[in-house]
Image: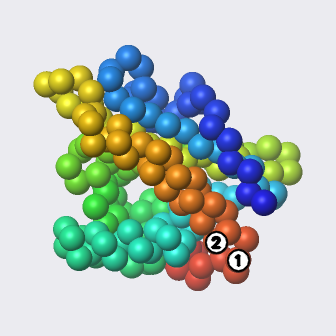
């Protein structure tokens, strides 16, 4: 069983700039996996997991932003700044913050190593409308679905990491 928790956003999170009193929605999910996982391995697993591949197909058809597993690995390992509908907004050795093409959402990844395991964090921000200061009724109606989807994406990444590593990760 994959046990996902919803801790507070870590103080050093790149996503934190969107959390403090802005009207934006931010969330944070975390799972601990055995062994050492690099940020590149984690993000590659996330973006190449079957559920996210479905999202990539939708993005290809709906907004003409195709992507491949190699594209996912390239952004995960810092070889490029763009992936599908996202651009890198911030990066460190342990974190990656992505901004969508409309600048309305952010996706955030973080790893934190312990002596025998790695904590994998995933979070997002939905940016408040500058005129109203909130996200609107549609976001609030879809929030439960967003929470389920975020958990499913993180589980997919964990499952992908437990499989044979993707050959594109090391290229």
Q: Confirm whether residue 143 shows in the render.
A: yes
Across and down, in percent, residue 57 comes to 34, 76
Is residue 62 rendered to the left or right of residue 9? left
Circle 2 sits in a helix, a strand or a loop, which is it? helix
The residue sitting at the right extreme is 116
Is residue 27 rendered to the left or right of residue 42? left
- Within 10 Å of disc 2 (Cα), the crowding (few <14, some 14-19, many 20+) is many
| Image height of 13 relative to 40, above or below | above
Who's the residue at 59% across and 43% down the image?
A: 29
Residue in the foreground of this view, choosing between 145 and 100? 145
Residue 132 quadrant: top left
- Within 10 Å of disc 1 (Cα), the crowding (few <14, some 14-19, many 20+) is few
Across and down, in percent, residue 153 comes to 54, 60
The residue sitting at the left extreme is 131
Across and down, in percent, residue 139 comes to 32, 41
Who's the residue at 50% across and 70% down the image?
A: 51
| Image height of 103 relative to 168, above or below | above
Who's the residue at 28% across and 69% down the image?
A: 59
Find out whether the residues at labels 1 and 2 contact each other: C-beta distance under 8 Å.
Answer: yes
Residue identifier under label 1? 163
Q: CA distance from mark 1 to mark 2?
A: 5 Å
Residue identifier under label 2? 160
Q: Confirm whether residue 106 shows in the render.
A: no
Is residue 109 rendered to the left or right of residue 134? right
């Amino acid at each position: 069983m994959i046990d996902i928790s919803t801790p507070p956003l870590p103080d050093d999170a790149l996503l934190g700039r969107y959390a403090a009193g802005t009207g934006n929605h931010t969330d944070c999910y975390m799972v601990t996996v055995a062994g050492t996982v690099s940020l590149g391995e984690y993000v590659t697993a996330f973006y190449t997991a079957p559920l996210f591949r479905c999202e990539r197909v939708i993005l290809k058809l709906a907004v003409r932003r195709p992507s491949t597993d190699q594209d996912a690995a390239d952004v995960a390992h810092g070889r490029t700044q763009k992936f599908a509908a996202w651009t890198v907004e911030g990066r460190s050795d342990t974190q990656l913050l992505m901004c969508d093409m409309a600048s309305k959402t952010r996706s955030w990844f973080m790893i934190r190593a312990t002596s025998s395991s790695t904590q994998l964090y995933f979070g997002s921000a939905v940016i408040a409308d500058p005129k109203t200061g909130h996200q609107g009724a549609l976001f609030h109606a879809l929030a439960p679905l967003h929470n389920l989807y975020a958990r499913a994406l993180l589980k997919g990444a964990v499952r992908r990491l437990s499989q044979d590593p993707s050959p594109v990760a090391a290229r």
